[in-house]
Amino acid sequence: MIVLKFGGTSVADAQRLKNVADIIRRQQKKKKKVVAVLSALSGVTDSLLRMCYLASLRDNTYLELFAQVHNRHLDTIHTLNLKEDSKLDSFVKEAFAELQNMLHGVYLLREQSPRTLDFVSAFGELLSTRILYAYFQLLQIPSSFWDGRALIQTDEHFGAARVDFRATNKNLRHAFDKLKGVGLMTGFIASTAQNETTTLGRGGSDYTAAIVGAALDAEEIQIWTDVDGVMTADPRKVKKAFSIPSMTYEEAMELSHFGAKVIHPPTIQPAMAKGIPLYIKNSFHPEHPGTRISKKQTDKTHLIKGISSIDDVSLLTVKGSGMVGVAGTSARLFNAIYGAGVNVILITQGSSEHSISFAVKPSDTKAARQRIESAFELEMQVKLIEPVQVEEGLSVIAVIGENMRHTPGVSGRLFQALGKTGSTW
Ligand code: ASP
Ligand code: MG
């Protein structure tokens, strides 16, 4: 079996949904069983969260946004010729009535909890997937509607719930055994053991696809998006960027960590654990082979798989003679900032141990600096350690590729290129 996942831009309107149906059917001709995981129509999750926020401020414009989202779904239903489908009609009516009630509650209480936000944002995926299911019925393609809340079980960490894989895998296998035709499943949403709606975090539909693929031992997982696979660099910044035919899971993780938005990083893990290849494909350009992500390095021609960057970071440097040869300094340092919930993007230490530099988000700079200053207060008083040095407005550039490992001269070329542009580093 294979799992296909379609992101928001791939299901943005009636035309795009028709295109999705074509892609699924083409895949079905090749393989026997398909489960397709869908995102909300593009931008709908953002709008739902925004409505909630506006309602909590008693800003009545939430009603306008509600009407816009409602109309957009009705238009899609209309254009797909699904107006006569009375079951779809009652599903949609009920969904918007529930949503409206919940928003009114938020309006009255003037507050939005993570639990409420999950409940509200779930409507995006429920609607997109239910509409495609109705369209499949119209086309008389056998299919089932899979509500992720009945299949993926999580804890109560609303907003980014953690999956109970034992219960989830069991549910998915059971549903799959009974499946006739295509499984059409909502991405992103799940529920607790008490049936309260949760979500897997923003961008979580990719993760749903990986969970399903791993549970059902899929032959492959295809992530359908709006670019031709994983690009060598951000095409908005680099004109000559092109899509990379294949890469390893590790390379894909590095690239997505440093900013390539093509794939949601947690997605890779369940696929990697089972060795299931991931394909990144373009639903606007289905003939393009896209990128294959798998265990083995099959591509020996590209030394470098990609260049990506994080645009705005702060670099903090802690140095002093009191650090040389003293065990435990870095443990104390990182423990101190860990306590402030600061995430470290990159670390370097000179081999003399005289200094440690690390990069954090600009918003974490102040907290990190304060924590370090209090952790090393005594050493700083007697100048064994110097005051924390902060450099702001820097970027991290990552050059990624496992083939570099055994090839001399790559970093020489890299720094030469940087030198030519007059960059300082
Ligand atoms: N619709 C959700 C979001 O935008 C999940 C997804 O699209 O992956 O975060
Ligand atoms: Mg989305």
Image (cartoon, rainbow, N blue to C red):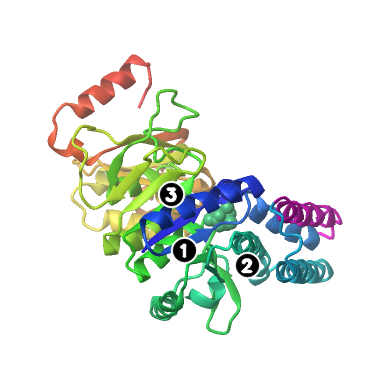
Residue 260 falls in image quadrant: top left
Is residue 375 visible to us here?
A: no
Badge 2 is on which residue? 118
Tell whether 11 sits left or right of 177: right
Question: Which callout, 1 or 2, points at the residue further toward the start of the chain?
Answer: 2
Q: Earlier in the sequence, mark 2 or mark 3?
A: 2
Residue topped by disc 3:
263
**Residue 366 coordinates in the image, percent (x, y):** 52, 48
Alpha-carbon span between mark 1 and mark 2:
15 Å
* Quarter of the image where the N terminus is located: bottom left
Amino acid type at mark 3: Ile
- Confirm or deny contact between disc 1 and disc 2 (CB under 8 A): no
Residue drawn where x is 38% and y is 80% of the image? 166
Residue 340 x/y as whole percent? 47, 59
Q: Earlier in the sequence, mark 1 or mark 3?
A: 1
In the structure shown, which secondary structural element does the residue marked by tag 2 occupy? helix
Quadrant where the C terminus sits is top left
Left or right: 77 as drawn, with respect to 271: right
Q: Which residues are magenta?
A: 57-79
Check the image and report above or below for 40 versus 114. above
